[in-house]
Amino acid sequence: AQKHPVIVWIYGGGFTIGSSGMANYDGEGLARKGVVFVSFNYRLGVLGFMAHPELTAESPHKASGNYGFLDQVAALNWVRRNIAAFSGDADNVTIMGQSAGSMSVFSLQASSLTRGLFQRAVGMSGGPGLGPEAASLANAEQLGVRYQKALKAATLAELRQLPADRILAIQNACAAGACGDAFLARPIVDGYFLSQAALELFKAGRQRDVPLLVGFTRDESWNELLTARTREQFHDISLRLYGDRSEEFLRLYAPSDDGAVKDVAADAVRDGGMASAMRAWARAQRRTGKSRVYMYVYSHGHPYAPGITFSDLDPATAGAYHASEIPFFLETLDALNLFRATRAWRDDDRRLSDEMSDCIVKFARTGDPATTQVPWPAYEPTDERIVEFGDSIRVATLDTARMNFMSSAHMQFSVGAPALQRRAD
């Protein structure tokens, strides 16, 4: 019997929300193109990422906290053992994730526990330098103790007796700042799943050296520059954000007049936010690995149904927002409308989705996403060509001077608009 390439999907949601059962993640479109599509749930929030000294003490690995990641490793081991029964090729597995799912792919690529479990990796809008850095085990354990106190549990045994809704209520309170500046759900350098922070493991050449495809969307990053409407406001905000490097910044990002401010600000925020994170991952792989890397930017806006409104999105300004590329790569345009017809998809949307999903299937099959429709050069630190999936598909080039400045400036960016920050990945 023919063996098919396997794609294992890892959902996002800031390590606190999400599910493999969302309509947007339906695997039928890719399966019709000849891959075996696998998705699974992993533990989230406190239940997925809480470290604690007592949990560490009782662990045979003297580690605690990365339970969500260990669920992902367990799923990959299950695929390794069983996927042949579903006509899948256990020796041709691609892991693919978006947002926190992409940060998971980055972590899985760095972990020694995943040796031999996958042969390719796809990361969409989530990588190094976004969100809190990996925590040390000691710091993560102290945060766990703080959670224990917030839950008024004297011992680990008492914690285990608590109903899940109590634990989740405290998690939400802590996320809103009730436990200090705690951020719980993140990778932990526990000495077991991660022996060092993932980027350090890449720098040492200890990552799984597999073909890698990474990218970002045009309009998903946010910082204060996007509020500027005049050159003067742009200049003032730049001074505040970049301090003694603002002169350098303003040489690279110089709006010619007030009318150009919006576009230049959007470029700066994109370059310094998700583009920098995904580029750092691509460069880390190319520096110490032999396998090829491919990059993309997604810039196509969704066509919204007339009169449609959302609680967390303004159709007029959303553009290519965080997660907007998922239904195109996974070929789930119709699934996105399953419960509420929010998009008025056109033929050109369907064509773009067909071509983007073809690239993913080709990458899963061969490790090279280029198709007859989409020429896709490999990314190199010395030749920063990437593919842009917009109203048309073209090969674009990252601006190396701008990107080098941004990667050295280490600015703080968030994902989505400020009102969404609590929900951002």
Image (cartoon, grey):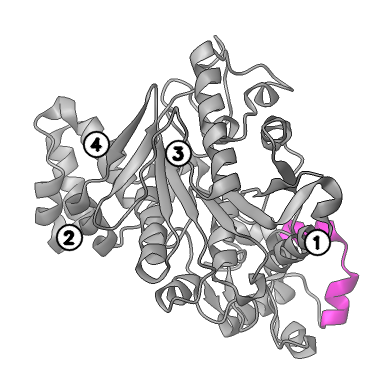
Stretch of the chain drawn in magenta: 155-170
Q: CA distance from mark 3 to mark 4?
A: 39 Å
Instruction: Give the residue displayed 74% in from the left and 22% down from the top.
Output: 339
Q: Which residue is mark 3?
A: 370
**Compared with residue 199, is residue 298 higher up or lower down, i.e. above or below?**
above
Q: In terms of secondary structure, what is the magenta stretch mainly?
A: helix
Instruction: Give the residue displayed 67% in from the left and 21% down from the top.
Output: 334
Q: Which residue is mark 1?
A: 78
> Hey, what amino acid is under mark 1?
Trp
Q: CA distance from mark 2 to mark 4?
A: 17 Å
**Compared with residue 142, is residue 375 higher up or lower down, i.e. above or below?**
above
Question: Residue 340 in the image: x percent, y percent?
Answer: 70, 19
* SS class, disc 2: helix
**Compared with residue 281, is residue 114 higher up or lower down, i.e. above or below?**
below
For residue 243, which numbered disc appears in the image? 2
For residue 228, which numbered disc appears in the image? 4
